[in-house]
Amino acid sequence: MDAILILGAAVWPNGPSPTLMRRTTHAARLWREGRAPLIIPCGGLGQHAPTEAAAMQTILESEGVSTDAIICEDQSTTTLENIRNAKRLLPGRRVIIVTDRYHGGRALMVARHLRLEAEIDAPEMPKLPIKQYLREVLARPAYALKLRQVPRDD
């Protein structure tokens, strides 16, 4: 694989959300295992500073990831923007996308639309997130329609 993409999650007033922390530490483990040489944390500024990407970079470095193995994508606010913006930073087209399992199907749909060779690697979750799974039931068809209008940027 060419890179690991970490899809964004919220930064709370007191720091990284549990979702952001879980995804980022999982990506750090994949990097330490040698699954890819580069990590691209994705996510712009939400309700609280710093950007999601900057918060992830701090976590990655604390987990032992080399600073030269991290390229931040700090402008995106949606799954589509996360992947499209990260694609411009990639050295190739083969990626591992780190997100939660309930979100993986939509992320994979976007990545494949953008002609990336992608696989999802999701961290374990402490409980079944029924609310998030239900949200995805609505989001996937909406994203499928939206992607019809999105250029593939070959």
Image (cartoon, grey):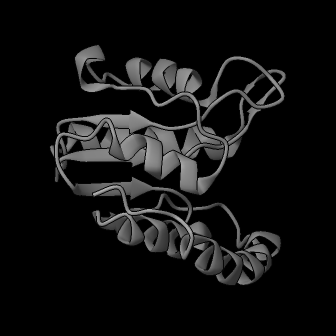
Residue 36 drawn at (x, y percent): 19, 45
- Rendering quarter of residue 10: top right
- Total numbered circles: 0
- Residue at 54% across / 27% down in the picture? 74
In which quadrant of the rendered image does the C terminus lie?
bottom left
Seen in the picture, residue 56 relative to 126 is either above or below; the reply is above
> As rendered, which of 90 and 30 lies closer to the eye?
90
- Residue at 31% across / 21% down in the picture? 64
Residue 2 drawn at (x, y percent): 17, 47
Residue 68 drawn at (x, y percent): 24, 17
Seen in the picture, residue 140 relative to 74 is either above or below; the reply is below
In the image, 103: left or right of 62?
right
Seen in the picture, residue 16 relative to 146 is either above or below; the reply is above
> As rendered, which of 93 and 100 lies closer to the eye?
93
- Rendering quarter of residue 48: top right
Residue 19 drawn at (x, y percent): 65, 47
In the image, 118: left or right of 44?
left
Seen in the picture, residue 106 relative to 37 is either above or below; the reply is below
In the image, 107: left or right of 64?
right
- Residue at 52% across / 46% down in the picture? 82
- Rendering quarter of residue 101: bottom right
- Residue at 52% across / 76% down in the picture? 105
